[in-house]
Structure formats: structure tokens, C-alpha cells
Image (spheres, helix red, strand yellow):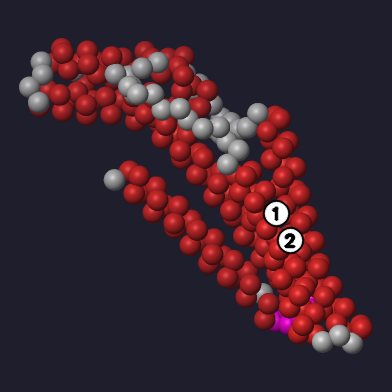
């Protein structure tokens, strides 16, 4: 019966894109169907009833074909891509502006004889305030991706689509967070380096950024494992 199930999936995937992702998907679905069939037989169902139940639970596999083509699995529509790019560009510009404000506060205290600590404190606070809007913009951009509407009765195709959607959404959010970490690290590096001339020490900022990135990635991986338990 296992061979009969494999043959059924060979027929279904005959018109699928000839990609590695399509092959992996076929193998995954085939093994899942075989496991379900064996479980039903072990529970006392006849071989034919178990086979028919498994076949009926597959769903329309052709709905998954666009997702296994060699392209971005989670691409946004052109309009949304432009909007996301604009938000990201504006956010980066505001971060750079915040760094310039902090740097200018140090130069202002030196050039006009103001109290350096007071002026730089105000400059730092102002820079932090300026960083709030771009952070909100990047969070919004990371959540622009379309949601997945879960149907009450799911077949095998629906389950795979839901997993793919959740996985690709998390990848998109993680990519945005990584860009944010390194953008902020770069701005902090140049701001502190230029204001203190401590170039031999400020490179540590990049090590800190790398550690933060690893921690964020670990948190995402742990969340993913918890969802699969």
C-alpha cells in the first residue's frame, strides 16, 4: 500500500515545477500520508478505508505549486514593496539624523563653551526621541505581510500552507530586525568614534551587535520549537 500512496503523489506532482522545493514537498507529503495510513491501520481500520481516508485528506496540492517555484516565497505586491522600501529608507535616514544630532551636541559644547555633559545629555535624549518613529516604521514594515486565514477543517495542503506562511513571516521579521540591529550599530559606532576618537575601542560595538543578533535568532528558534511541540 505504501507504493500505491507514492504512486498517487507521483501523479499529483507530475505537473509541479521541477525544483528542489517541489521534490522536498512531495517527499514530505508522501511520508506524512504513509504515516497516517499506518496509524489508521494500527487503530483497526481496513487497508482500503485507511487508504481512501488518507487520499481524501490531501486536498488540492496544485495550490502549493506557486510556493515551490524558484522565487521569493513571501514576496509582497509591487505597491507594498515600494511602500516597505520607502519606510525602511526613511527609518534609516532618521537614525542617521539622530546620530548627527548627538554628534552635533558634542561639537556645540566644544565650540561655544557650554557645559559638555549637559549639552551631550540633552543631545542624547533628543537622539533617543528621534529614534522612536523609525523604530515604529520598521516594526510596521515587518508586519506588512498578508495574514493567513485558517479554515475550520484543514486538509494536508492547508496545514502545509499554514506552516509555510508562519515560517516565511518569521524569516521576514527576523531579516528586518537584523537590518535594524546593524544600522543602529553602525550609527552608534561612527557617532561615538567621531566624538571620542576612541577608534581602537569602539569596534567592540560590532561584537555587541553580533551577540545581540545571535540572541534574537536564538529567541526566534526557541519560539519555533515551542510551536512544533
Q: Is residue 61 left or right of residue 193?
A: left
- The answer to which quarter of the image holds residue 166 is top left
* Marks 1 and 2 in Cβ contact (< 8 Å): yes
Total tally of numbered discs in the picture: 2
| Separation (CA) of disc 1 from disc 2 | 7 Å
State the residue at coordinates (70%, 54%).
133
Q: Secondary structure at mark 1?
A: helix
- The answer to which quarter of the image holds residue 51 is top left
Q: Which residues are magenta?
A: 194-200
Q: Position of residue 92 (x, y in %)?
A: 74, 54
Residue 130's tag is 2
Q: Position of residue 153 (x, y in %)?
A: 32, 22
Q: Secondary structure at mark 2?
A: helix
Q: Is residue 134 left or right of residue 212?
A: right
Quadrant location of the N terminus in the rendered image: top left
Report the front residue among 72 and 17. Answer: 72
Quadrant location of the C terminus in the rendered image: top left
Q: Is residue 48 above or below residue 29?
A: above
State the residue at coordinates (70%, 82%).
200
Q: Which residue is mark 1?
A: 133
Amino acid at each position: 500500500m505504501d507504493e500505491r500512496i507514492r504512486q498517487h503523489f507521483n501523479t499529483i506532482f507530475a505537473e509541479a515545477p521541477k525544483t528542489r522545493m517541489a521534490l522536498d514537498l512531495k517527499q514530505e507529503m508522501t511520508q506524512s500520508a504513509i504515516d497516517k495510513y499506518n496509524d489508521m491501520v494500527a487503530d483497526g481500520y481496513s487497508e482500503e478505508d485507511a487508504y481512501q481516508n488518507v487520499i481524501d485528506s490531501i486536498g488540492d496540492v496544485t495550490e502549493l505549486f506557486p510556493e515551490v517555484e524558484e522565487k521569493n516565497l513571501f514576496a509582497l505586491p509591487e505597491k507594498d514593496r515600494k511602500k516597505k522600501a520607502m519606510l525602511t529608507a526613511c527609518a534609516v535616514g532618521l537614525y542617521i539624523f539622530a546620530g548627527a544630532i548627538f554628534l552635533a551636541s558634542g561639537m556645540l559644547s566644544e565650540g561655544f563653551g557650554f557645559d559638555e555633559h549637559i549639552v551631550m545629555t540633552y543631545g542624547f535624549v533628543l537622539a533617543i526621541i528621534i529614534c522612536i518613529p523609525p523604530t515604529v516604521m520598521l516594526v510596521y514594515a515587518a508586519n506588512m505581510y498578508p495574514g493567513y486565514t485558517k479554515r475550520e477543517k484543514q486538509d494536508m495542503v492547508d496545514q502545509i500552507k499554514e506552516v509555510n506562511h508562519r515560517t516565511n513571516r518569521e524569516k521576514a521579521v527576523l531579516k528586518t530586525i537584523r537590518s535594524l540591529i546593524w544600522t543602529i550599530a553602525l550609527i552608534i559606532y561612527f557617532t561615538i568614534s567621531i566624538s571620542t576618537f576612541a577608534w581602537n575601542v569602539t569596534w567592540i560595538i560590532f561584537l555587541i551587535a553580533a551577540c545581540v543578533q545571535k540572541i534574537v535568532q536564538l529567541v526566534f528558534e526557541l519560539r519555533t520549537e515551542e510551536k512544533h511541540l
